Image (cartoon, rainbow, N blue to C red):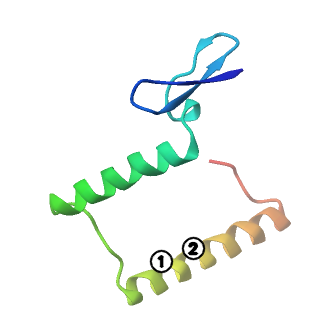
Amino acid sequence: MSRETQEDGNEEVQTKTGRGRGFLSMTPERRREIASKGGKSAHEQGLGHRFTHDQAVEAGRKGGRKRAEVMKQKKEGEYLDE
């Protein structure tokens, strides 16, 4: 594999099968740049969401409960991978 710099300064990875495509072929900096633009755009359009402290606490609590439930099911042999 090799890296090539495009005219706009972005790098792409060329794989054995051909030209690299998508996010995998981009440098971490380029992926971060694109993600940042998406987040800013969403907030400008009023579609972005920021969790309040209480919402974040509740989400963490739910995730912890679910994980404990799954671990218990696995231990008892009742877990069905969905």
Dot 2, crowdedness within 10 Å: few (<14), some or many (≥20)?
A: few
Q: Is residue 75 left or right of residue 46?
A: right
User: Label 2 belongs to which residue?
Assistant: 63
Q: Quadrant of residue 17?
A: top right
Compared with residue 73, is residue 25 higher up or lower down, i.e. above or below?
above
Residue 60, position as x, y percentages in the image: 54, 79
Q: Nearer the viewer, residue 35 or 4?
A: 4
Compared with residue 61, is residue 1 higher up or lower down, i.e. above or below?
above
- Give the SS element for disc 1: helix
Q: Which mark is residue 59?
A: 1
Residue 57, position as x, y percentages in the image: 48, 86
Q: Are marks 1 and 2 in contact (CB under 8 Å)?
A: yes
Residue 27, position as x, y percentages in the image: 57, 40
Q: Is residue 42 left or right of residue 73?
A: left
Tell me the amino acid under the disc marked 1.
Ala
Residue at the image position 16 percent from the left and 63 percent from the top: 46
Dot 1, crowdedness within 10 Å: few (<14), some or many (≥20)?
A: few
